[in-house]
C-alpha cells in the first residue's frame, strides 16, 4: 500500500526557517518524481515544488523561489522541503504528492505550517 | 504565466448530471487531471490524462478536454459527491491548479 506521511510542521515566527519531511513507503520511491503542494486556510491548492526521481533537478513556484529548497534522500525514502525566510502568507497545509505520468496519484495527509508572530 | 479558470460553485440535484469546467488557453493541447477534496481530507485523483478514471473511482465520473476547456462530468450525482474539485495541468515545467469548484448537491 502506498503511503506518504508528512511531518515537521508547526508554528514559527516570520523570518524563521523550518524543514518538513515526507516519508514514503509501499512503492519504489527512487522511481518517481515528487511534489509539494500547499493549501492556505480556506483556499485552493497551490503547487510549490517538484523534484526529479534522482534528485538532480528541482523546480519551484515563483512565490517561493530563492526561499524554499526541495531535496530527497532515496536511501531513506524521504522527501524534504526546507523553508527559509518564512512569511505569513506561507501559512498552509503542505502536502507531498507522488507524480505518475503528469498526474498526482497519491497524496499525504498534510502537515500544517503556521507563520505568526 | 499560464492560468486555468474554474467556476467557484456548481449546484446539482441528486440524480442529475453535474458539469465542472476548467478553461485555459489551448488547454486541450495539454493533459488535464481532476481531484476531489472533501472537508478535512487530502485530495483524491478522480480523472487523469483528460478522460481516464483510476481504479476505485465510480463510473459516473468522466472527463473530456478539447479546445480551451476541460470538463469533469458526474452523472447521477449522489450526496457523497459533494466536495471541492480542482483541475490540474502542466505549463512548461510548472504545475497549474485551477482555483477549485465547490459542488453542492441540493
Image: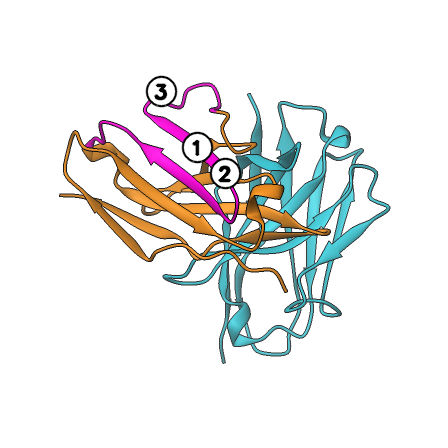
Q: Are marks 2 and 1 on the same chain?
A: yes
Q: Residues within 10 Å of mark 2 (few under 14, many from 20)?
A: many
Badge 3: chain ID: B
**Relative image position of residue A86 (x, y in whole percent):** 62, 72
**Relative image position of residue A11 (x, y in whole percent):** 51, 67
Q: Is residue B102 magenta?
A: no
Q: Disc 2, disc 3: CB below 8 Å?
A: no
Badge 1: chain ID: B
Magenta residue span = B53-78
Q: Disc 2, disc 1: CB below 8 Å?
A: yes
Q: Is residue B61 magenta?
A: yes
Element type at marker 3?
loop
Q: Which chain is orange?
A: B
**Relative image position of residue A76 (x, y in whole percent):** 75, 35
Q: Residues within 10 Å of mark 3 (few under 14, many from 20)?
A: few
Element type at marker 1?
strand
Relative vertical location of residue B25 with respect to residue A114 in this rendering, above or below: above
Along the line of sight, the residue nearer the viewer: A91 or B28: B28
Q: Residue at x 40, y 23 (%)?
A: B57
Relative vertical location of residue B57 with respect to residue B103 in this rendering, above or below: above
Along the line of sight, the residue nearer the viewer: A49 or B100: B100
Cα–Cα span, label 2 and label 3: 18 Å
Cα–Cα span, label 3 and label 1: 11 Å
Asked whether, in this view, residue A57 is left or right of residue A11, the answer is: right
Which is in the foreground here, disc 2 or disc 3?
A: 2
Element type at marker 2?
strand
Q: Which chain is cyan?
A: A
Asked whether, in this view, residue B35 is left or right of residue A27, the answer is: left
Q: Which residue is label 3 attached to?
A: B59
Which circle marks residue B63 in the picture?
1
Q: Which residue is label 2 attached to?
A: B65
Residue at the right extreme, as displayed: A56
Amino acid at each position: 500500500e502506498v503511503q506518504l506521511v508528512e511531518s515537521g510542521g508547526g508554528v514559527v515566527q516570520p523570518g524563521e526557517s523550518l524543514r518538513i519531511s515526507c516519508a514514503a513507503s509501499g512503492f519504489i520511491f527512487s522511481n518517481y518524481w515528487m511534489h509539494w503542494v500547499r493549501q492556505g486556510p480556506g483556499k485552493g491548492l497551490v503547487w510549490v515544488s517538484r523534484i526529479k526521481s534522482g534528485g538532480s533537478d528541482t523546480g519551484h513556484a515563483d512565490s517561493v523561489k530563492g526561499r524554499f529548497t526541495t531535496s530527497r534522500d532515496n536511501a531513506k525514502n524521504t522527501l524534504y522541503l526546507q523553508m527559509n525566510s518564512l512569511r505569513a502568507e506561507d501559512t498552509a497545509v503542505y502536502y507531498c504528492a507522488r507524480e505518475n505520468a503528469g498526474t498526482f496519484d497519491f497524496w499525504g495527509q498534510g502537515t500544517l505550517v503556521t507563520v505568526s508572530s | 504565466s499560464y492560468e486555468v479558470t474554474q467556476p467557484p460553485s456548481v449546484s446539482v440535484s441528486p440524480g442529475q448530471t453535474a458539469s465542472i469546467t476548467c478553461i485555459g488557453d489551448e488547454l486541450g493541447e495539454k493533459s488535464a487531471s481532476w481531484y476531489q477534496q472533501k472537508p478535512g481530507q487530502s485530495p483524491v485523483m478522480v480523472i487523469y490524462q483528460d478522460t481516464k478514471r483510476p481504479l476505485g473511482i465510480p463510473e459516473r465520473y468522466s472527463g473530456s478536454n478539447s479546445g480551451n476547456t476541460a470538463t469533469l462530468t458526474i452523472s447521477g450525482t449522489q450526496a457523497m459527491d459533494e466536495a471541492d474539485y480542482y483541475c490540474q495541468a502542466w505549463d512548461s515545467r510548472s504545475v497549474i491548479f485551477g482555483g477549485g469548484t465547490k459542488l453542492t448537491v441540493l
